[in-house]
Amino acid sequence: MALVLNEEQQMLKTSAKEFLAENAPVEALRKLRDSKDPKGYDPALWSQMTELGFAGIAIPEEYGGMGFGYTGLGQVLEETGRTLTASPLISSVLLSATLINLAGNEHQKAALLPAIADGNLLVSVANEESNAHKPLAAETRFRKSSKGYSITGTKKFVLEGGTANKFIVSAKKNSKSGLTLFVVDAGAKGVKIDQTPMMDSRNIVTVTFKSVKAAATDILGGEGKGAAPLEKALDIARIGLSAEMLGSMMEAYDRTIAYLKERQQFGVPIGVFQGLQHRAADMYCEIENCKSLVIKSLQAIDSDSKGLAVYASMTKAKISQELKRVTNEAIQMYGGIGMTDDEEIGFFMKRARVAQRTFGDSNYHLDRFATLNGF
Amino acid sequence: MDTATATDLKTFRAETRAWLEANYPESLRKPVKNQEKEVYWGGRNPYFHTPDTKLWFDRMYEKGWAVPHWPTEYGGGGLSKQEQKVLREEMARLGCRPPIFSFGISMLGPALLKFGNEHQKMKYLNEITAGKVWWCQGYSEPGAGSDLAGLQTSAEDMGDHYLVNGQKVWTSYADSADMIFCLVRTDPEAPKHSGISFLLIDMEAEGVSTRPIKLISGKSPFCETFFDNVKVPKENLVGKLNQGWTIAKFLLTHERSMIGGVGDARKEVPLSQIAIKEVGLDDGKLADPVLRLKVAQWMMDGMSFKLAVERILDEAKKGQQMGAKSSYFKYYATELNKDKHELMMELGGYDALKWGEEYEGGKLARDMCRTKANSIEGGTSEVQLNIISKRILGLPGK
Ligand SMILES: Cc1cc2nc3c(=O)[nH]c(=O)nc-3n(C[C@H](O)[C@H](O)[C@H](O)COP(=O)(O)OP(=O)(O)OC[C@H]3O[C@@H](n4cnc5c(N)ncnc54)[C@H](O)[C@@H]3O)c2cc1C
Ligand SMILES: Cc1cc2nc3c(=O)[nH]c(=O)nc-3n(C[C@H](O)[C@H](O)[C@H](O)COP(=O)(O)OP(=O)(O)OC[C@H]3O[C@@H](n4cnc5c(N)ncnc54)[C@H](O)[C@@H]3O)c2cc1C
């Protein structure tokens, strides 16, 4: 497949760009942060976004979505990266809806997906437990009795967990059994949420499940059968998040290049200095590489490629490395101004650090890439 | 020409595959040991490594596939872009060697197609496709490397001919070549970019001499080239007088895309395979954990660059300008290749340090030395970064 967008995808990108520039500029994130709103996103903005169909882009039509595929969703995510728009797109739409679509039965899909596509239902995956990404290493346990299931454990780094209506929580029966995924109400008895602000001002929480009840009908994908769909959903989410990160990377870069042309020192724009030019040109090359990885990987999701895992790890690793570099160079090239809270460029660096770590950082994926390639 | 239907292409692929199977000589179906010696370079005194090398070239030439992308009236194949791609892929599939390797095809040809007159195209392009003339490139001079427009070799208008005096340097294969395409100064008074012309000179002409220079790899594939009162017919001027810089830049773009590996469908052994062979696995992982990550990083960079070339070519097909992107291709591909060779040295351990006979014991080390030139020849990495800064990013000059 040609590595270019089709007309529909291009139109989606343009409309997302225009909408976000007008309604959710970086200034909106600053306001959200300064108001100390624990939600970490703006519900009014979210309802506008869902009216435009953003939440349903990748959800199949029979479940109330647009059936536009992940290449389309990736374009919207890329644009939210440019504006650093905080919303439940990554947690509820990209990861949770994908997981439900992959692992859920007819009944679960019909009950959950249309509500996610509407934006009324927010679902977060509660999976991580240790201090670094170990997606299949749950210590959370469930017990099974004649009355149903009971789940106990603590989940870290739950994206948008403070505002979720439901969690998809992973648990094992014992240390040797496979992963089981339960859909649990956020308001269920025994669910406790602790929120500590992260450096990107978004809503990421720790959730404690203490003997939380669930029924057999709450299991996604069958008992002990959660690992495969979870890994696949995570791969898709890694690629979608990479699209968001690419948007942030390009925006931080464009702003830096504009600054190099505008800032005068020694009687000339600082962009004349070769010490800066060559670093800028080298970053240009890496951004071209990253753009290609993202579109190729998004297409790999839509064509159900066998190489999905390799593409996901390659893309997440490389994008994480380059976003780190571009945001660091941005601050350096802005000089003293780049260190100030008044200047927006610092917001890109802070969001970057959280996104780099989410769903596995570059070290994790470099290692996984080697393993997947047989060495 | 690019509107061929999918069925046409399918048929073309099937026919191409069958033809190659039938015509690619059995004896060439093994890895090349010494690229330089085994490939056919063309020329007035042709050298064929084996009779099958000749057979392969002759068959491909007759088919028009020595230069598949040129028009048939110049001895090319007249293939559409899609057909060229199919042919490249099918050749890669069977591991076919290129029938000929020539700067005439990769550099001079595109310039003549765009700037040459009909007589020049008929004569020189037909000679190139037939493998009859070996061309070399006379751009660099001792005082004009990165600052190419500072060149001093002069061509004086003597009425019925030009009189050429001066010196070129780093002229690859000048001692084997029959003809040289040269940048010469035809107006010493004009600003430096506006006094340059593009001239074709016969290496057998009186007053032309060469002196080989030995490289750090131990080989001497390039020369100093001297012009001492060399008479050049006026019809050998390509394009307009004093407008050679336009041609020079056009040609460099081609050269850089070529060095950048654009359109290269060759299958390479993945670096991870080499690593496993050299270092071995331990519990499924490369036995050296540091090298493992370096190899993984290199492969990721390499794959992402390959995809970027593919994407940018796809965008070009949809009408987006390539602009100065050839500088990105050239820069990134050559830096990658240097890194790869350094990594292969690390993987190769003590044995990699051997400096045996060329292409025997010392191959790895000698090849590594040779790759150092990748980021120098065709315009240095720093020059490519300057071009990206100015022409793509629009950063101000001094
Ligand atoms: C936390 C903090 C504390 C500070 N404390 C003090 C203080 O107590 N007292 C005080 O007087 N100042 C202080 N400063 C100011 C500091 O010294 C300046 O920020 C610094 O000198 C850079 O100047 P600038 O911010 O104007 O950046 P600019 O000069 O605008 O530089 C912007 C970018 O251009 C680059 N650049 C500029 N010129 C060239 C060149 N010729 N070649 C290549 N690159 C170039 C810079 O390296 C930088 O990356 C402080 C700054 C910070 C961030
Ligand atoms: C193996 C090989 C084959 C070659 N074959 C040919 C051939 O067939 N025909 C031909 O005409 N030429 C050929 N060349 C020459 C090649 O094009 C030149 O070597 C090249 O353009 C660099 O010029 P230079 O060697 O004079 O280096 P210089 O221009 O002297 O450069 C020296 C260093 O200074 C840096 N530098 C120079 N200017 C700048 C700047 N503005 N900003 C930042 N850094 C700068 C360079 O990047 C380099 O690192 C060949 C070279 C090699 C190594």
Image (cartoon, grey):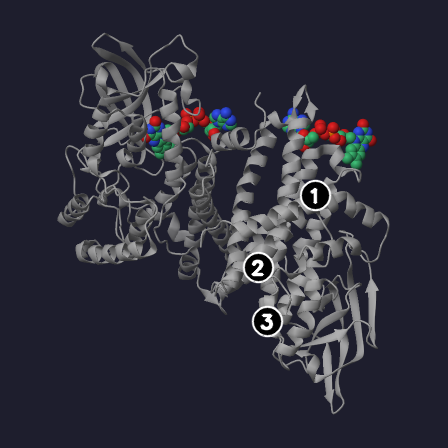
Residue ID for mark 3: A102
Above or below, A58 relative to B197? below
Residue ID for mark 1: A21
Q: Distance between the residues labelled 3 and 2?
A: 16 Å
Residue A373 is situated, as x and y percent measured from the top left of the image, at 47, 62
**Three-letter amino acid code at the position of disc 1:** Ala
- As drawn, the residue found furthest toward the bottom would be A146
Of all chains, the one bearing label 1 is: A
From the viewer's perspective, is B214 left or right of B397?
Answer: left
The residue drawn where x is 32% and y is 50% is B4
Work out whether disc 2 and disc 1 sit on a shared chain: yes
Q: Please tell me whether mark 3 sits on a helix, a strand or a loop.
A: helix
**Three-letter amino acid code at the position of disc 2:** Phe
Q: Please tell me whether mark 2 sits on a helix, a strand or a loop.
A: loop
The image quarter containing residue B322 is top left
Above or below, B269 relative to A330? below
Residue A278 is situated, as x and y percent measured from the top left of the image, at 56, 33
The image quarter containing residue B29 is bottom left
Query: Residue A68, which numbered label?
Result: 2
